[in-house]
Amino acid sequence: MELEHAMELFAVFGGIECDIELDFLDDLELLIRFSFVERYLEFSNLISPSYLLEEPYRYILISIARGDGRLTNVFRKARVGDTLGMSIVNQLIELGIVELEESREAPLKKYPNQKLEKSLRSYKIEAKIRFKQPFYRFWFGFVEPYSKDLSQNRSQRFFENFEQHFSRLNSLVFEQLSNELLNQHYNDKLKSMGSYWDVNSEFDILAKTTRGETVVGECKYKNRRVCKSELTKLKQKAEVSGLKADTYALFSKSGFSNELLNSEDEDLILFELEDFRKLL
């Protein structure tokens, strides 16, 4: 099985491989039609507990799957208050459906009476909510919003949304696997890893080694090679956010330009799609 096909399958069925019988060598669209259109009710029974498909859990989970994961944005899109929202999130954490990724951003105020610029006064440092299994992210991001159609064997709107947004889902899984590959590269000795976001920007990877070195990474799941301009933009973003990187790591599905491949930068690591085979 090709690695790209394996990653796409993982983005849809990751976490439930032992609960289903499918020929994963088939075309992805055929598998999705067979699983979520022809066998919609059967696959809906894999969502456990079943009340997750009811309000207000359903709205919260759809908001997590289709947004940036920030608590404020999730509650706003789900149209629930903070108290009820946090109560539901805590239940989902206990069920092992989601997890919180805490913000690592330093407080904007360096001392108590510091006055912030007007544009920053409403800014809030907050955690993000992540799904623990790709299947649940796919279900609530792509299937559940069209549950009424799919239960009646109507699939047009479902597939239109799938074709428009599936690349974003692949990018999220690629980012997750890139973190794991980076940790393996450092012999499982990363002290911390994951994404990083602050008032200025967002980074796919910010990792710290046991030796105190900082690694800043960018993941590109695109059908084109990554060029040096991407590295330049990453360095500029890091400077604006005050991140002092000892190493930059680039991850690309479609490889790199000759300029990057021939680079003699000692602070640069390049990971291509074939490198992910080490995770199998």
Image (cartoon, grey):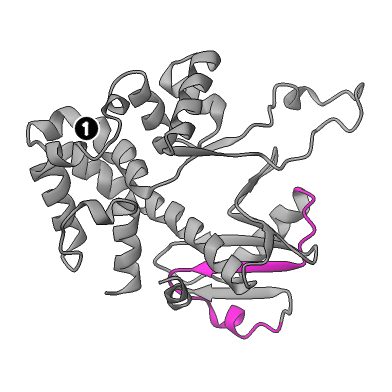
Closer to the camera in the image, 151 or 109: 151
- 1 in relation to 131, above or below: below
Task: Tell me: residue 91, above or below residue 8.
Answer: above
**At 37% from the left edge and 23% from the top edge, which residue is drawn?**
57
Could you tell me which residue is drawn at 80 percent across and 33 percent down? 108
Q: Secondary structure at mark 1?
A: helix
Dot 1: few (<14), some (14–19), or many (≥20) neighbours within 10 Å? some
Amino acid type of disc 1?
A: Tyr
Residue 105 is situated, as x and y percent measured from the top left of the image, at 73, 40
Q: Is residue 260 magenta?
A: yes
Residue 231 lies in the magenta-colored region: no
| Vertical relation: 68 (above or below) 195 | above
Q: In terms of image quadrants, where is residue 77?
A: top left
| Residue 193 x %, y % | 64, 55
Left-right relation of 11 to 236: left
Q: Horizontal placement of 50 versus 248: left or right?
A: left
Q: Position of residue 277 (x, y in %)?
A: 42, 75
Specify the segment rendered in magenta.
241-264
- In the rendered image, which quarter contains the C terminus? bottom left
Q: Position of residue 236 (x, y in %)?
A: 72, 57
Along the line of sight, the residue nearer the viewer: 278 or 77: 278
Q: Which residue is mark 1?
A: 146
Residue 188 as seen in the image, left or right of residue 119? left
Dividing the image into 4 quarters, which one contains the N terminus? bottom left
Which residue is located at x 47 percent, y 32 percent? 94
Which corner quadrant of the image does residue 59 belong to?
top left
